[in-house]
Amino acid sequence: MKIDQLHEALAGLVRGPSWRQRRLLGGPQGAHVELDGKPCLSFASNDYLGLANHPALRAAAARALREAGLGAGASHLLAGHHVLHDRAEIELARFVEMPAALLFSTGYMANLAVVTSLLGRGDALFADKSNHASLVDAALLCRAEHHRYRHADIDHLEDLLKHSGAGNKMIVSDAVFSMEGDIAPAEKLLDLAQRYHAWLYLDDAHGFGVLGANGQGSLAHQGFGEKARGYPGLVYMATLGKAAGVAGAFVSASSDVIDWLVNKARTYIYTTAMPPALAAAVMESVRVIRDEPWRHDALRENIRAFRSGCDGLRMRLSASDTPIQALILTRDDKALQVSDLLLARGVYVPAIRPPTVPPGTSRLRISLTAAHQLSDVRQLVANLHDIFDA
Ligand SMILES: *Cc1c(COP(=O)(O)O)cnc(C)c1O
Protein backbone atom coordinates (compact mmCIF):
# COMPACT_ATOMS: atom_id res chain seq x y z
CA MET A 1 0.00 0.00 0.00
CA LYS A 2 1.47 3.31 -1.08
CA ILE A 3 1.25 6.35 1.19
CA ASP A 4 -0.76 8.43 -1.26
CA GLN A 5 -3.18 5.60 -2.12
CA LEU A 6 -4.09 4.59 1.41
CA HIS A 7 -6.89 7.06 1.95
CA GLU A 8 -8.65 6.12 -1.28
CA ALA A 9 -8.23 2.41 -0.65
CA LEU A 10 -9.84 2.84 2.75
CA ALA A 11 -12.72 4.81 1.24
CA GLY A 12 -13.33 1.78 -1.00
CA LEU A 13 -13.56 -0.50 2.03
CA VAL A 14 -15.72 1.65 4.26
CA ARG A 15 -19.03 -0.08 5.06
CA GLY A 16 -18.48 -2.56 2.25
CA PRO A 17 -18.89 -6.30 2.88
CA SER A 18 -15.32 -6.68 4.11
CA TRP A 19 -15.14 -3.56 6.29
CA ARG A 20 -14.11 -4.46 9.81
CA GLN A 21 -14.75 -2.40 12.86
CA ARG A 22 -14.38 -2.97 16.55
CA ARG A 23 -17.20 -2.83 19.02
CA LEU A 24 -16.55 -1.43 22.46
CA LEU A 25 -16.85 -3.83 25.35
CA GLY A 26 -17.62 -2.11 28.64
CA GLY A 27 -17.12 -4.09 31.84
CA PRO A 28 -16.05 -7.72 32.06
CA GLN A 29 -16.44 -10.50 29.53
CA GLY A 30 -19.43 -12.79 30.07
CA ALA A 31 -22.70 -14.08 28.66
CA HIS A 32 -24.27 -10.68 29.23
CA VAL A 33 -22.04 -7.78 28.29
CA GLU A 34 -22.17 -4.13 27.54
CA LEU A 35 -21.39 -3.58 23.87
CA ASP A 36 -21.13 -0.09 22.41
CA GLY A 37 -22.80 1.16 25.55
CA LYS A 38 -25.81 -1.19 25.33
CA PRO A 39 -26.50 -4.38 27.26
CA CYS A 40 -26.66 -7.51 25.14
CA LEU A 41 -26.53 -11.26 25.24
CA SER A 42 -23.23 -12.26 23.67
CA PHE A 43 -22.19 -15.40 21.82
CA ALA A 44 -18.93 -13.89 20.65
CA SER A 45 -16.26 -14.73 23.20
CA ASN A 46 -14.00 -17.77 23.46
CA ASP A 47 -14.45 -17.68 27.22
CA TYR A 48 -15.95 -21.18 27.00
CA LEU A 49 -15.96 -21.95 30.71
CA GLY A 50 -16.85 -18.46 31.89
CA LEU A 51 -13.52 -17.99 33.65
CA ALA A 52 -12.49 -14.59 32.27
CA ASN A 53 -14.19 -12.91 35.20
CA HIS A 54 -14.02 -15.74 37.76
CA PRO A 55 -13.52 -14.38 41.31
CA ALA A 56 -10.87 -16.98 42.18
CA LEU A 57 -8.81 -16.10 39.11
CA ARG A 58 -9.14 -12.40 39.81
CA ALA A 59 -8.10 -12.96 43.41
CA ALA A 60 -5.08 -15.03 42.39
CA ALA A 61 -4.00 -12.29 40.01
CA ALA A 62 -4.57 -9.58 42.62
CA ARG A 63 -2.53 -11.47 45.21
CA ALA A 64 0.29 -11.97 42.72
CA LEU A 65 0.16 -8.30 41.75
CA ARG A 66 0.86 -7.39 45.33
CA GLU A 67 3.70 -9.87 45.64
CA ALA A 68 5.28 -9.70 42.20
CA GLY A 69 4.28 -6.30 40.86
CA LEU A 70 2.91 -5.66 37.40
CA GLY A 71 5.43 -5.90 34.58
CA ALA A 72 7.87 -8.77 34.02
CA GLY A 73 10.34 -6.11 32.97
CA ALA A 74 12.48 -8.25 30.69
CA SER A 75 12.48 -11.28 28.44
CA HIS A 76 12.63 -14.75 30.00
CA LEU A 77 16.29 -15.16 29.09
CA LEU A 78 17.37 -11.90 30.69
CA ALA A 79 15.76 -11.16 34.05
CA GLY A 80 12.06 -11.70 33.33
CA HIS A 81 11.59 -15.39 34.13
CA HIS A 82 9.67 -15.22 37.38
CA VAL A 83 9.18 -18.08 39.80
CA LEU A 84 5.42 -17.80 39.04
CA HIS A 85 6.11 -18.48 35.33
CA ASP A 86 8.17 -21.47 36.32
CA ARG A 87 5.47 -22.89 38.57
CA ALA A 88 2.79 -22.34 35.96
CA GLU A 89 4.85 -24.27 33.40
CA ILE A 90 5.27 -27.19 35.79
CA GLU A 91 1.53 -27.26 36.54
CA LEU A 92 0.51 -27.00 32.91
CA ALA A 93 2.83 -29.84 31.91
CA ARG A 94 1.46 -31.96 34.76
CA PHE A 95 -2.14 -31.15 33.81
CA VAL A 96 -1.74 -32.27 30.18
CA GLU A 97 0.59 -35.11 31.29
CA MET A 98 3.49 -34.04 29.11
CA PRO A 99 7.17 -33.93 30.13
CA ALA A 100 7.61 -30.16 29.92
CA ALA A 101 5.89 -26.90 29.03
CA LEU A 102 6.90 -23.41 27.97
CA LEU A 103 4.80 -20.27 28.41
CA PHE A 104 4.31 -17.76 25.60
CA SER A 105 2.69 -14.34 25.63
CA THR A 106 0.23 -15.34 22.89
CA GLY A 107 -0.78 -18.39 20.90
CA TYR A 108 0.21 -16.58 17.74
CA MET A 109 3.77 -16.31 19.01
CA ALA A 110 3.81 -19.94 20.17
CA ASN A 111 2.84 -21.08 16.68
CA LEU A 112 5.53 -18.97 15.06
CA ALA A 113 8.03 -20.32 17.61
CA VAL A 114 7.42 -24.02 17.11
CA VAL A 115 7.22 -24.02 13.33
CA THR A 116 10.18 -21.70 12.69
CA SER A 117 12.42 -23.40 15.27
CA LEU A 118 11.90 -26.93 14.04
CA LEU A 119 11.65 -26.30 10.28
CA GLY A 120 13.77 -24.39 7.80
CA ARG A 121 14.62 -24.19 4.12
CA GLY A 122 14.49 -27.61 2.46
CA ASP A 123 12.12 -29.04 5.06
CA ALA A 124 8.41 -29.63 4.47
CA LEU A 125 5.30 -28.60 6.34
CA PHE A 126 1.96 -30.36 5.80
CA ALA A 127 -0.94 -28.23 6.95
CA ASP A 128 -4.70 -28.64 7.03
CA LYS A 129 -6.32 -26.06 4.73
CA SER A 130 -8.56 -24.84 7.55
CA ASN A 131 -5.73 -24.14 9.99
CA HIS A 132 -5.63 -20.90 11.95
CA ALA A 133 -4.05 -17.86 10.27
CA SER A 134 -1.12 -17.86 12.69
CA LEU A 135 -0.09 -21.29 11.41
CA VAL A 136 -0.23 -20.05 7.84
CA ASP A 137 2.04 -17.17 8.78
CA ALA A 138 4.38 -19.54 10.62
CA ALA A 139 4.63 -21.61 7.45
CA LEU A 140 5.64 -18.59 5.39
CA LEU A 141 8.16 -17.46 7.96
CA CYS A 142 9.95 -20.82 8.30
CA ARG A 143 10.74 -21.04 4.57
CA ALA A 144 9.97 -24.75 4.35
CA GLU A 145 7.87 -26.17 1.52
CA HIS A 146 4.25 -25.52 2.46
CA HIS A 147 1.85 -28.30 1.47
CA ARG A 148 -1.80 -27.75 2.33
CA TYR A 149 -3.99 -30.83 2.43
CA ARG A 150 -7.77 -30.77 1.99
CA HIS A 151 -9.56 -30.20 5.26
CA ALA A 152 -9.25 -33.29 7.50
CA ASP A 153 -8.42 -35.42 4.44
CA ILE A 154 -6.00 -38.09 5.67
CA ASP A 155 -5.63 -39.71 2.23
CA HIS A 156 -4.64 -36.42 0.66
CA LEU A 157 -2.14 -35.84 3.46
CA GLU A 158 -0.61 -39.28 3.03
CA ASP A 159 -0.29 -38.74 -0.69
CA LEU A 160 1.61 -35.50 -0.10
CA LEU A 161 3.84 -37.11 2.52
CA LYS A 162 4.61 -40.03 0.20
CA HIS A 163 5.76 -37.74 -2.60
CA SER A 164 7.89 -35.47 -0.47
CA GLY A 165 11.64 -35.88 -0.55
CA ALA A 166 12.22 -33.61 2.44
CA GLY A 167 14.22 -35.14 5.27
CA ASN A 168 12.50 -33.17 8.00
CA LYS A 169 8.71 -33.05 7.93
CA MET A 170 6.01 -31.62 10.14
CA ILE A 171 2.26 -32.23 10.12
CA VAL A 172 0.36 -29.34 11.65
CA SER A 173 -3.33 -29.06 12.46
CA ASP A 174 -5.79 -27.24 14.64
CA ALA A 175 -7.09 -29.91 17.03
CA VAL A 176 -10.50 -28.19 17.03
CA PHE A 177 -11.06 -25.98 13.99
CA SER A 178 -11.68 -22.43 15.01
CA MET A 179 -14.29 -21.41 12.44
CA GLU A 180 -16.38 -24.58 12.28
CA GLY A 181 -15.86 -26.34 15.60
CA ASP A 182 -15.13 -29.75 14.10
CA ILE A 183 -12.42 -31.97 15.57
CA ALA A 184 -9.29 -33.00 13.66
CA PRO A 185 -8.62 -36.71 13.07
CA ALA A 186 -5.69 -36.39 15.44
CA GLU A 187 -5.03 -40.06 16.09
CA LYS A 188 -4.76 -40.72 12.36
CA LEU A 189 -2.46 -37.73 12.05
CA LEU A 190 -0.31 -39.29 14.75
CA ASP A 191 -0.20 -42.62 12.91
CA LEU A 192 0.96 -40.86 9.76
CA ALA A 193 3.51 -38.79 11.67
CA GLN A 194 4.99 -41.96 13.15
CA ARG A 195 4.98 -43.77 9.82
CA TYR A 196 6.70 -40.90 7.98
CA HIS A 197 8.89 -39.90 10.89
CA ALA A 198 7.40 -36.42 10.95
CA TRP A 199 6.75 -33.99 13.75
CA LEU A 200 3.10 -33.72 14.72
CA TYR A 201 2.14 -30.25 15.91
CA LEU A 202 -1.37 -29.90 17.35
CA ASP A 203 -2.86 -26.48 18.09
CA ASP A 204 -5.48 -27.09 20.78
CA ALA A 205 -6.56 -23.46 21.23
CA HIS A 206 -10.22 -24.53 21.30
CA GLY A 207 -9.90 -27.94 22.95
CA PHE A 208 -7.83 -27.16 26.02
CA GLY A 209 -10.04 -26.67 29.06
CA VAL A 210 -13.08 -27.84 27.14
CA LEU A 211 -12.56 -31.36 25.82
CA GLY A 212 -11.57 -34.52 27.65
CA ALA A 213 -12.22 -35.56 31.22
CA ASN A 214 -11.59 -32.46 33.38
CA GLY A 215 -10.81 -30.31 30.37
CA GLN A 216 -7.40 -31.82 29.72
CA GLY A 217 -7.86 -31.17 26.02
CA SER A 218 -8.02 -32.97 22.71
CA LEU A 219 -5.48 -35.74 23.38
CA ALA A 220 -7.47 -36.98 26.37
CA HIS A 221 -10.76 -36.45 24.55
CA GLN A 222 -9.76 -38.62 21.62
CA GLY A 223 -8.47 -41.30 23.94
CA PHE A 224 -4.99 -41.68 22.52
CA GLY A 225 -3.13 -39.53 24.99
CA GLU A 226 -0.79 -42.27 26.09
CA LYS A 227 0.16 -43.24 22.57
CA ALA A 228 0.68 -39.57 21.64
CA ARG A 229 2.85 -38.87 24.67
CA GLY A 230 5.01 -41.87 23.77
CA TYR A 231 5.95 -40.22 20.46
CA PRO A 232 8.94 -37.87 20.82
CA GLY A 233 7.81 -35.96 17.70
CA LEU A 234 4.56 -34.75 19.32
CA VAL A 235 4.35 -31.04 20.07
CA TYR A 236 1.16 -29.78 21.69
CA MET A 237 0.11 -26.14 22.01
CA ALA A 238 -2.83 -24.61 23.84
CA THR A 239 -3.83 -21.02 24.36
CA LEU A 240 -4.69 -19.59 27.77
CA GLY A 241 -6.86 -16.69 26.65
CA LYS A 242 -9.83 -18.82 25.60
CA ALA A 243 -11.30 -21.49 27.90
CA ALA A 244 -8.60 -20.79 30.51
CA GLY A 245 -9.89 -17.23 30.72
CA VAL A 246 -6.52 -15.48 31.09
CA ALA A 247 -4.01 -14.73 28.31
CA GLY A 248 -1.03 -16.33 26.61
CA ALA A 249 -0.30 -19.88 25.58
CA PHE A 250 1.94 -22.82 26.31
CA VAL A 251 3.78 -25.39 24.27
CA SER A 252 4.12 -28.86 25.73
CA ALA A 253 6.54 -31.48 24.44
CA SER A 254 9.64 -33.48 25.33
CA SER A 255 12.15 -31.56 27.42
CA ASP A 256 14.51 -31.63 24.42
CA VAL A 257 11.96 -29.74 22.32
CA ILE A 258 11.34 -27.24 25.12
CA ASP A 259 15.09 -26.64 25.60
CA TRP A 260 15.44 -26.17 21.86
CA LEU A 261 12.67 -23.57 21.82
CA VAL A 262 14.23 -21.66 24.73
CA ASN A 263 17.43 -21.44 22.70
CA LYS A 264 16.07 -20.93 19.20
CA ALA A 265 12.55 -19.49 19.17
CA ARG A 266 12.75 -15.83 18.28
CA THR A 267 9.22 -15.10 19.53
CA TYR A 268 10.31 -16.51 22.88
CA ILE A 269 13.73 -14.90 23.12
CA TYR A 270 13.09 -11.40 21.80
CA THR A 271 10.01 -10.44 23.73
CA THR A 272 9.08 -9.43 27.26
CA ALA A 273 7.73 -12.18 29.48
CA MET A 274 4.02 -12.05 30.29
CA PRO A 275 3.22 -10.36 33.62
CA PRO A 276 3.84 -12.91 36.41
CA ALA A 277 0.38 -12.19 37.86
CA LEU A 278 -1.11 -13.74 34.73
CA ALA A 279 0.90 -16.89 35.34
CA ALA A 280 -0.58 -17.00 38.84
CA ALA A 281 -4.07 -16.63 37.36
CA VAL A 282 -3.30 -19.45 34.92
CA MET A 283 -2.48 -21.79 37.80
CA GLU A 284 -5.75 -20.91 39.48
CA SER A 285 -7.51 -21.46 36.16
CA VAL A 286 -6.12 -24.99 35.88
CA ARG A 287 -7.43 -25.69 39.36
CA VAL A 288 -10.91 -24.40 38.48
CA ILE A 289 -10.97 -26.29 35.17
CA ARG A 290 -10.19 -29.48 37.09
CA ASP A 291 -12.29 -28.90 40.20
CA GLU A 292 -15.49 -27.31 38.88
CA PRO A 293 -16.85 -30.06 36.62
CA TRP A 294 -20.31 -28.47 36.61
CA ARG A 295 -18.92 -25.97 34.11
CA HIS A 296 -18.21 -28.75 31.63
CA ASP A 297 -21.69 -30.20 32.20
CA ALA A 298 -23.37 -26.81 31.72
CA LEU A 299 -21.42 -26.22 28.53
CA ARG A 300 -22.32 -29.64 27.11
CA GLU A 301 -25.97 -29.05 27.99
CA ASN A 302 -25.93 -25.67 26.20
CA ILE A 303 -24.37 -27.23 23.09
CA ARG A 304 -27.01 -29.97 23.06
CA ALA A 305 -29.84 -27.46 23.54
CA PHE A 306 -28.55 -25.19 20.79
CA ARG A 307 -28.17 -27.97 18.26
CA SER A 308 -31.55 -29.50 18.91
CA GLY A 309 -33.08 -26.01 18.86
CA CYS A 310 -31.68 -25.50 15.36
CA ASP A 311 -33.63 -28.49 14.00
CA GLY A 312 -35.71 -27.30 11.09
CA LEU A 313 -33.76 -24.11 10.61
CA ARG A 314 -33.17 -23.62 6.88
CA MET A 315 -29.43 -23.20 7.29
CA ARG A 316 -26.38 -25.41 7.27
CA LEU A 317 -25.16 -25.96 10.82
CA SER A 318 -21.54 -27.09 11.13
CA ALA A 319 -20.95 -30.69 12.26
CA SER A 320 -19.65 -29.76 15.68
CA ASP A 321 -20.00 -31.06 19.22
CA THR A 322 -17.77 -28.33 20.56
CA PRO A 323 -18.69 -24.84 21.84
CA ILE A 324 -18.01 -23.42 18.37
CA GLN A 325 -21.17 -23.64 16.30
CA ALA A 326 -21.32 -22.14 12.83
CA LEU A 327 -24.37 -21.33 10.74
CA ILE A 328 -23.04 -21.14 7.22
CA LEU A 329 -24.56 -18.84 4.63
CA THR A 330 -23.64 -18.88 0.99
CA ARG A 331 -23.95 -15.14 0.45
CA ASP A 332 -21.23 -13.17 2.16
CA ASP A 333 -23.36 -10.05 2.72
CA LYS A 334 -26.14 -12.13 4.33
CA ALA A 335 -24.05 -13.10 7.36
CA LEU A 336 -23.47 -9.46 8.21
CA GLN A 337 -27.15 -8.64 7.70
CA VAL A 338 -28.28 -11.39 10.03
CA SER A 339 -25.69 -10.40 12.59
CA ASP A 340 -27.05 -6.83 12.50
CA LEU A 341 -30.64 -8.07 12.81
CA LEU A 342 -29.72 -10.14 15.86
CA LEU A 343 -27.89 -7.26 17.47
CA ALA A 344 -30.93 -5.04 17.01
CA ARG A 345 -32.74 -7.66 19.11
CA GLY A 346 -30.05 -7.52 21.78
CA VAL A 347 -28.17 -10.68 20.76
CA TYR A 348 -24.61 -10.43 19.55
CA VAL A 349 -23.32 -13.12 17.17
CA PRO A 350 -20.41 -12.04 15.00
CA ALA A 351 -20.39 -12.58 11.24
CA ILE A 352 -17.20 -14.19 9.97
CA ARG A 353 -16.38 -13.28 6.41
CA PRO A 354 -13.58 -13.74 3.87
CA PRO A 355 -10.63 -13.71 4.11
CA THR A 356 -11.04 -15.35 7.52
CA VAL A 357 -13.12 -18.05 5.78
CA PRO A 358 -13.28 -18.96 2.05
CA PRO A 359 -15.57 -16.80 -0.13
CA GLY A 360 -19.14 -18.10 -0.25
CA THR A 361 -18.94 -19.60 3.25
CA SER A 362 -19.56 -16.56 5.43
CA ARG A 363 -21.02 -17.59 8.70
CA LEU A 364 -22.47 -16.71 12.02
CA ARG A 365 -19.98 -18.01 14.54
CA ILE A 366 -21.74 -18.86 17.75
CA SER A 367 -19.62 -19.51 20.81
CA LEU A 368 -21.44 -21.21 23.61
CA THR A 369 -20.10 -21.01 27.14
CA ALA A 370 -20.73 -22.41 30.58
CA ALA A 371 -21.76 -18.89 31.60
CA HIS A 372 -24.85 -19.02 29.36
CA GLN A 373 -28.11 -20.10 30.96
CA LEU A 374 -30.38 -22.45 29.03
CA SER A 375 -32.76 -19.52 28.71
CA ASP A 376 -30.00 -17.54 26.94
CA VAL A 377 -29.57 -20.34 24.42
CA ARG A 378 -33.34 -20.54 23.92
CA GLN A 379 -33.46 -16.79 23.31
CA LEU A 380 -30.81 -17.11 20.60
CA VAL A 381 -32.57 -20.03 18.96
CA ALA A 382 -35.95 -18.27 19.00
CA ASN A 383 -34.44 -15.21 17.33
CA LEU A 384 -32.76 -17.35 14.66
CA HIS A 385 -36.08 -19.05 13.88
CA ASP A 386 -37.79 -15.66 13.70
CA ILE A 387 -35.24 -14.36 11.23
CA PHE A 388 -34.74 -17.41 9.05
CA ASP A 389 -38.26 -18.84 8.99
CA ALA A 390 -39.77 -15.50 8.03
C1 LIG B 1 -6.85 -17.93 18.97
C2 LIG B 1 -6.01 -18.92 18.25
C3 LIG B 1 -4.62 -18.80 18.19
C4 LIG B 1 -3.93 -17.57 18.70
O1 LIG B 1 -3.91 -17.54 20.08
P1 LIG B 1 -3.75 -16.11 20.82
O2 LIG B 1 -3.31 -16.47 22.18
O3 LIG B 1 -5.09 -15.49 20.76
O4 LIG B 1 -2.72 -15.36 20.05
C5 LIG B 1 -3.90 -19.81 17.60
N1 LIG B 1 -4.51 -20.88 17.06
C6 LIG B 1 -5.85 -21.02 17.06
C7 LIG B 1 -6.46 -22.23 16.44
C8 LIG B 1 -6.63 -20.04 17.65
O5 LIG B 1 -7.96 -20.14 17.62
Image (cartoon, rainbow, N blue to C red):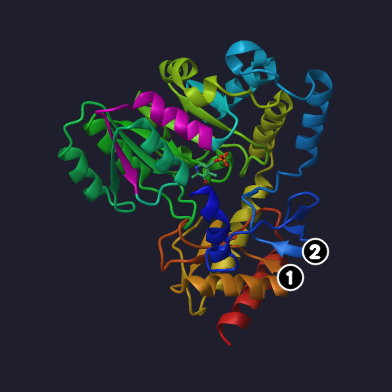
| Residue 314 drawn at (x, y percent) | 49, 80
Residue plotted at (55% across, 63% down): 13
Say which of 365 and 272 sits in front.
272
Task: State how many labels appear.
Answer: 2
343, above or below 373, in the image: below
Q: Residue furthest top?
A: 78
Say which of 19 and 356 sits in front.
19
Q: Residue furthest bottom?
A: 390
Magenta highlight on residue 221 = no
Mark 2–mark 1 CB contact (< 8 Å) = yes
Magenta highlight on residue 117 = yes
Q: Which residue is mark 1?
A: 346
Residue plotted at (46% across, 28% down): 113
- Going by the numbered disc 1, the residue's amino acid type is Gly
In the displayed structure image, the side of residue 275 where residue 39 appears, left or right: right
**Neighbour class for label 2 at 10 Å: few (<14), some, many (≥20)?**
some
**Neighbour class for label 1 at 10 Å: few (<14), some, many (≥20)?**
some
| Residue 84 drawn at (x, y percent) | 69, 20
In the displayed structure image, the side of residue 123 where residue 61 appears, left or right: right
Q: Secondary structure at mark 1?
A: loop
Q: Quadrant of residue 56?
A: top right
Quarter of the picture holding the C terminus:
bottom right
Say whether residue 116 is visible.
yes
Residue plotted at (52% across, 76% down): 311
Q: Residue furthest front?
A: 4
The CB of the residue at mark 2 lies under 8 Å from ligand 1: no
Say which of 115 and 45 sits in front.
115
Which residue range is magenta in the image? 108-128
| Residue 12 drawn at (x, y percent) | 54, 65
- Going by the numbered disc 2, the residue's amino acid type is Pro
Q: Which mark is residue 39?
A: 2
